[in-house]
Amino acid sequence: MAAAAPLPLAGRRVLVTRPAEQADALCEAIAERGGTAVRFPVMAIEALQDDGALRELAGRLDDFDLAFFVSPNAVRHALRSLLALREWPAGLAVSMVGKGSERALAEYGFTRIIAPDSGFDSEAVLALPEFAPSAVRGRRVVVFRGDGGRDLLGDTLRAHGAEVEYVTCYRRGMPTVAPDVLVELAERKELDAISLTSTEGVRNLVALLGGALPAALARVPVFASHPRIADAARRAGFAAVLDTAPGDAGLLDALAAHFGTSLG
């Protein structure tokens, strides 16, 4: 009987920097491929202390034609408040980007979702026929997001004649972590890869490390799921930054391809 092929991430330790509540699926997938996921969240997701804006919006949901959720966090924090007050309007279309947001919407029973088949950013959404100028002109759109974030989607829709309202439904903050542990892993060469999935995460990581990357950590290969994230990682001082396809699948494929050809 032929020996089983080695798992692509066997013996590899991969830093997972996603918020704690969003890291499980990726960590499990890394373990399934033989690797060890090292959890080090660089962002904390917090509920709003005052959800008055969401509660007020609940009474006006019927006025909108389209609701866009920027992330799984936006889905869960917005719908947790809104659906406690009322049913979702039958005529209000739902849109998002990314498989994580799609799964989060499915948890709430949404099956008809406007989303790109490929691409995981605002540019991919704006390329959809449903977001063409002729389709959005005169429409009212509500965008659920965290505090801050990119304005490209809303600005473009407004330029195309839509009315856009942003609603903040959660806060992003700095987590409580021990950066010394991370530096020690890198210095002992016990960290093989770093996954980075947001530009804000890159900034937070550097801030948590005191504003500059230690040399040992800067040498660890970074896997970035979007060109903007890769650019931010290079500017931060990482020496080896690899662009991956979007989502968990793209990251895992890139990790497997890199380490599958560099074992031993």
Image (tube, helix red, strand yellow):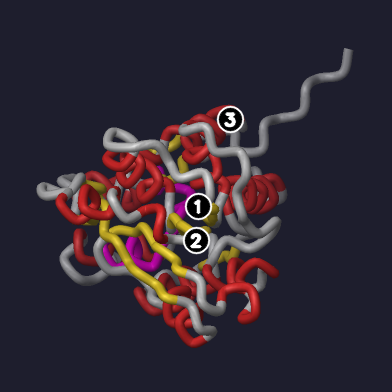
Q: In front of the other: label 1 or label 3?
A: 1
Residue 246 in view in this figure = yes
For the view shown, which residue lies furthest in the right direction?
1
In the picture of the structure, the residue carrying the numbered disc 2 is: 65
Res 92 label: 1
| Residue at x 59%, y 67% (from the top left corner) | 125
Question: How far across and down, in percent of the image, does residue 115 sit?
Answer: 62, 56
Question: How far across and down, in percent of the image, does residue 150 sit?
Answer: 38, 73
Q: Provide the residue span drawn in magenta.
A: 189-204
- Left/right of residue 90 with respect to residue 155 in the rendered view: right
Please, what is the three-letter code of the amino acid marked with disc 1?
Leu
Question: How far across and down, in percent of the image, does residue 18 sit?
Answer: 38, 48
| Residue at x 32%, y 67% (from the top left corner) | 166
Q: Earlier in the sequence, mark 3 or mark 2?
A: 3
For the view shown, which residue lies furthest in the left direction?
49
In the picture of the structure, the residue carrying the numbered disc 3 is: 34
The image shows residue 121, relative to residue 88, as above or below, that is: below
